[in-house]
Each structure stands twice: as C-alpha cells, then as structure tokens.
Image: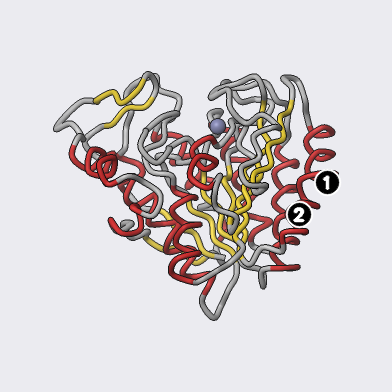
Amino acid sequence: MRLYTHPSCLQHDPGPGHAESPARLRAVLQALDHDRFAAIDRIEAPRATREQLLRVHDADYVDRILATAPASGTMRLDEDTLMSPASAEAALHAAGAAVAAVDAVMGDRGGHAFCAVRPPGHHATPNRAMGFCLFNNIAVAAAHALAAHGLKRVAIADFDVHHGNGTQDIFEREPRVLFISSHQSPLYPETGRENERGVGNVVNAPLSPGDGSYEFRELWEGALLPRLYAFKPQLVLVSAGFDAHRNDPLADLRLSTEDYAWITGRLVDLARAHADGRLVSSLEGGYDLNALAASASAHVSELML
Ligand SMILES: [Zn+2]
C-alpha cells in the first residue's frame, strides 16, 4: 500500500475559520504516523502536468488557476472556494498524486494507494472551481487511466456526503467511466438526483438527512456494489470523503468510523474480483478533525490488507 502526499497540500490555506483547513490534512497524516501504519510506502506526490489536467479541464480554466494565486492573503473564487499563495502548487500536487498512484498500481506490483491531499477535487467542473475544489483530482486520475494505460472500464466510487457534481459533469458522456455516488440530499451542491444517469454510466443514490449505517450499507450492498460488479472495472478509483460521519459539522448523515472500514473492504473486494486488486483512493471531505482522522485510519487499514 502506497501513501501519496506533498508538503504544499498543508500550505494551501483558505483562511481562518474555513472548514477546509490545513488542520484536516495534519490530523490525517498524524493518525497515519502510528506504528501500525509503518509498512506503508510513503511517496512525495509529483505535480500533475498541463497535459494531464487538460484531459478534464478547459485550458482557460487551468491557466486561470495557475495565474491567479494571490501574493499574500486569500483570493475568493466563489463563495466558499478560496486561493492562498500556495494553492496552485497544492492543487497541482493533489492532482499529480492521483496520477502517480494510478501509474504505480498499474505497474507490476499492483496494489492500493491513498492520496492524502488537499484541496479536494470532486466538485471542480471542467471550467469552474467550487465547493473548496480547484482541480478534479479523481477525474484527472480516471482520464489518465484511459489515455495513458488504455483502460476501457474505470469505476469511480464516491462516498463523500456531497454529490461529486464535477466528476459527473466531466464523465457523463464517457461510457468507459462508471461514476457511482452516494450522498445526502438535499445538500450542497443540490445535484445528484437519481434521474441524472449520464449515458447509463452515472448512478446517483441520495440518502436522507438522519440516515445512518443501516441505510448506507443497504444502499451499497443492495444497489451500488452490484452495479460496480456488473461493470467489471479494470481499476477502482475512490473519492474518499469522510463527511457522512455522524460527528461531521457540514451534513446530517450518521455514519460511524466502522462504516468507512466496511465500505473500503467492499471496494477492495471489488478491485480483487475484477481489477487485479488495483485501487486508488483520494481524500475529499471530512470536517470534524477527530472523526476524519479515525475514519481515514480505518480506510487506510483496510487498504493495507
Ligand atoms: Zn463533502
């Protein structure tokens, strides 16, 4: 199991009081510093290249993100997405982590990788930063798997509490990618209805405020995992947000830390069944620092098995 991160991901700072704080990644990395994670192969994430980003983002948008970082303080891109001086660098390494992780698991050793990065990615559309996201890390990884490795079937499982609208926008007409999302509805960004199906390659599964372990597991076991198995993915990608945890301040689902171990184990099984075990996960949300650290640890523990 490989862990990708980069120091710049700790320097991206949307400002005091912002939920998507550097403290989030510090909490995750500190939790993964424990002896039981000593066997993890730790790798400094490279930058994504312009070519890799242009597979999913418009050239004007990439140029704008790389050019607009302020010299000091923060600059607002939308009501909750801000850039600081280190943000462009962090965004390049966050996307680059997922690309490098795909290259690694597609190599001889196969296996699993977790990208402990920020800014997160799944709300970023081809031409718009939103929801704390600048580049769509998991989408850049999926596009890389198609273009550089010639894969025909790449699955993205997104269990962040928010709908991955950006990932859906990018792939809704790309049948080589299956995008499956469970998320709370109603909730930001108010997309992800069941009737949004792309070209049959998008599966949206809304959960209601107050839903917890039972509803989450029933949904994945009964509907979402069967869709993933039927697709027979050659690579499993995961948008790993931990904000459906019951202690999370931004949403109202009631998952426990154990639920994250459970869904991770099921996705590892899927990867073993169809993808020679190849799975790459990238950190999305999770805003209660203790719940985030515990849930990410549970996730990574399963990836080590
Ligand atoms: Zn989220």
Q: Nearer the viewer, residue 193 or 223?
A: 193
Q: Is residue 114 above or below residue 17?
A: below
Residue 252 place in picture, x, y as percent: 67, 21
Q: How crowded is mark 2: few (under 14 residues within 10 Å), some or many (20 or more)?
A: some
Which residue shows up at 57% across the image and 36% down it? Answer: 292
Q: Which residue lies furthest to the left in this view?
A: 71
Q: Distance between the residues labelled 2 and 1?
A: 9 Å
- Dots 2, 1 in contact, CB < 8 A: yes
Residue at image mark 2:
266
Tell me the amino acid under the disc marked 1: Glu
Q: Which residue lies furthest to the bottom in this view?
A: 108
The first of marks 2 and 1 along the sequence is: 1
Residue at image mark 1:
221
Q: Residues within 10 Å of mark 1 (few under 14, many from 20)?
A: some
Label count reads 2
Q: Which of 108 and 178 is in front in this view?
A: 178
Residue 190 place in picture, x, y as percent: 58, 22
Give the structural element (helix, strand or loop) at label 1: helix
Residue 55 vs residue 169: left or right? left
Residue 86 vs residue 37: left or right? left
Which residue shows up at 77% across the image and 25% down it? Answer: 211
Tell me the amino acid under the disc marked 2: Arg
Task: Report which quarter residue 131 is drawn in.
Answer: top left
Give the structural element (helix, strand or loop) at label 2: helix
